[in-house]
Image (tube, grey):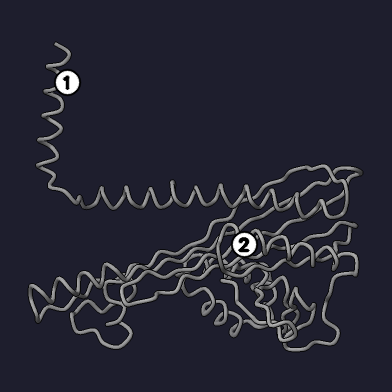
């Protein structure tokens, strides 16, 4: 069992992250007996669902799934309806409602839109665990406009130790960005200089022969960047009352998201930019070399 699940997870790590949902569905169809193990181990983009009772949107993932149904944090009901679905105890449900209201404010502060959901459940050792979900989708408003999505999954465990509480946090961010501006510019330039020219640069499966059609033709010149990042943290906080769990976890998640956001911008995107510039310079390299030599000469004159 373990070897088969490990092989499936190893395969998922090598497949394009943009198709993770389709790939997981295919593996589940081939090995239905291991569906729970696979779904519980692979992070997938969060699904947006609407609570039928309240009309509010919420996020669906493996943590609020029971069979083929998903529990709403607003009404505590399953969709499709499930009579004996797993639900938190009344005490934990009260904390869950307060947490959803708090993180709804957090979402509006940092995301200015999107959807958030919080789900809690009891642990056998007397503590409890939960997951905070955040999702923001950027839709292209016109041809050539960029699109993308941001998914945050923060899973935590809380263990009370007298007037202190110990928290373990595992945060995963899934980011997908699609830039069609390069393709639109290339097509425009090609049309203006050579009316019969056809752009065929694409990292998403263009056939490269200049005669693409259908979906391939629409994706020519499209640049897609996607991936996920996971980080962990542990911390102790004072516990004055039950509601203190919300502020404590909120502080940890806020700090973690800021760190991971900076890592994405400075390390990952910055490194990608450096690699691209090393492969192909925008400016004339000979011109840049002459400028460097001139700078050295000026520095030499100054030192004299």
Residue 195 in sight in this render: yes
At a point 80% along the width and 46% down the height, the residue shown is 166
In the rendered view, tell whether residue 32 sits above or below residue 109: below
The reply, left or right, for residue 88 in relation to residue 143 is right
The reply, left or right, for residue 182 in relation to residue 254 is left
> In the image, residue 194 lies at what x, y percent?
7, 76
> In the image, residue 89 lies at what x, y percent?
89, 69
Residue 3 in sight in this render: no
In the rendered view, tell whether residue 256 sits above or below residue 298: below
In this view, which residue lies farthest toward the top? 304
In this view, which residue lies farthest toward the left? 194
Label 1 or label 2, whichever comes before in sequence order? 2
At a point 80% along the width and 53% down the height, the residue shown is 245
Cβ atoms under marks 1 and 2 closer than 8 Å = no
At a point 11% along the width and 23% down the height, the residue shown is 297
In the rendered view, tell whether residue 212 sits above or below residue 99: below
State the mark number for residue 107. 2
Out of 196 and 75, give the one closest to the viewer: 75
The reply, left or right, for residue 286 in relation to residue 265 is left
> In the image, residue 112 lies at what x, y percent?
55, 63
Q: Quadrant of the N terminus?
A: bottom right
Q: Quadrant of residue 124?
A: bottom right
Q: CA distance from mark 1 to mark 2?
A: 52 Å
Q: Which residue is mark 1?
A: 299
> In the image, residue 139 lies at what x, y percent?
44, 74
């Amino acid at each position: 069992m373990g070897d088969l699940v490990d092989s499936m997870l190893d395969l998922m790590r090598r497949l394009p992250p943009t198709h993770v949902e389709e790939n997981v569905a295919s593996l589940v169809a081939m090995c239905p007996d291991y569906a729970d193990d696979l779904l519980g181990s692979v992070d997938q983009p969060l699904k947006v669902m609407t609570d039928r009772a309240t009309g509010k949107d919420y996020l669906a993932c493996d943590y609020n799934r029971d069979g083929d149904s998903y529990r709403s944090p607003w009404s505590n009901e399953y969709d499709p309806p499930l009579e004996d679905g797993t639900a938190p105890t009344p005490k934990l449900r009260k904390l869950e409602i307060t947490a959803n209201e708090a993180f709804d404010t957090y979402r509006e502060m940092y995301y200015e839109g999107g959807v958030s959901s919080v789900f809690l459940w009891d642990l056998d050792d007397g503590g409890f665990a939960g997951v905070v979900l955040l999702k923001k989708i950027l839709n292209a408003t016109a041809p050539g406009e960029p699109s993308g999505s941001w998914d945050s999954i923060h899973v935590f465990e809380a263990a009370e130790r007298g007037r202190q509480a110990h928290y373990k946090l595992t945060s995963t961010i899934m980011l997908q960005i699609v830039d069609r501006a390069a393709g639109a510019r290339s097509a425009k330039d090609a049309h203006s200089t050579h009316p019969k020219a056809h752009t065929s640069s694409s990292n998403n499966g263009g056939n490269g022969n200049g005669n693409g059609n259908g979906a391939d033709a629409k994706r020519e010149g499209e640049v897609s960047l996607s991936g996920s990042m996971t980080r962990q943290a542990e911390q102790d906080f004072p516990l004055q009352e039950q509601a203190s769990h919300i502020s404590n976890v909120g502080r940890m998640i806020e700090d973690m998201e800021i760190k991971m956001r900076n890592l994405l911008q400075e390390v990952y995107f910055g490194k990608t930019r450096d690699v691209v510039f090393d492969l192909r310079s925008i400016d004339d390299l000979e011109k840049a070399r002459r400028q460097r030599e001139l700078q050295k000469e000026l520095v030499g004159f100054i030192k004299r």
